[in-house]
Amino acid sequence: MQKAKVMQLFRLFACTEDIRPWQDLADAAIRAVEQQLKPDADTEDVRLCWYAAALANLQYRRMLAAKAATPTYAGTAASQKCAEGECSLAERFAEAYRKDAADLLRDDAFVFRRV
């Protein structure tokens, strides 16, 4: 998998110019994708880069949402922030790119059962 391509796509998804502080997220996403690969999968398939970038973006959005969370106290209403919607969109991106690369990834939902 091409780390430079993952970082380029992550920059696109995250809408940020300075991605250096977030390189660990991309590295973790690349490792997560590599662990999901089938043994005979083509590791240079560009769909894996898109999936890894989407996973990194999901973690990035979750971190931003956690940072923006406003504490609530008894008798007060929680403020609605758009970060919740951004996390939902990032989750949909990650799932869409996972489906796109599904033929390269192991299906962890498959279970053998005794008859």
Image (cartoon, rainbow, N blue to C red):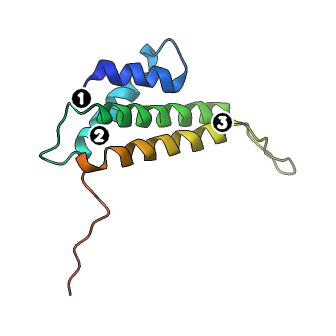
Q: Amino acid at mark 2?
A: Val
Report if the CB atoms under discs 2 and 1 are less than 8 Å apart: yes
- C-alpha distance separating marks 2 and 1: 9 Å
Q: Amino acid at mark 1?
A: Met
**In this view, the mark in front (3 or 1):** 1
Q: Which residue is mark 3?
A: 83
- C-alpha distance separating marks 3 and 1: 30 Å
Is residue 19 shown left or right of residue 4? right
Q: Residues within 10 Å of mark 2 (few under 14, many from 20)?
A: many
Picture quarter with the C terminus: bottom left
Residue 95 in the image, given as x and y percentages of width and height:
44, 47
Is residue 48 shown left or right of residue 72? left
Say which residue appears at 40% left-offset and 19% top-offset. Answer: 8
**Residue 33, numbered label:** 2
Q: Which residue is mark 1?
A: 1
- C-alpha distance separating marks 2 and 3: 25 Å
Report if the CB atoms under discs 3 and 1 are less than 8 Å apart: no
Say which residue appears at 76% left-offset and 41% top-offset. Answer: 80
Residue 52 in the image, given as x and y percentages of width and height:
36, 34
Q: Secondary structure at mark 2?
A: helix
The image quadrant of residue 23 is top left
Q: Amino acid at mark 3?
A: Ala
Q: Is residue 69 visible?
A: yes
Is residue 85 shown left or right of residue 35? right
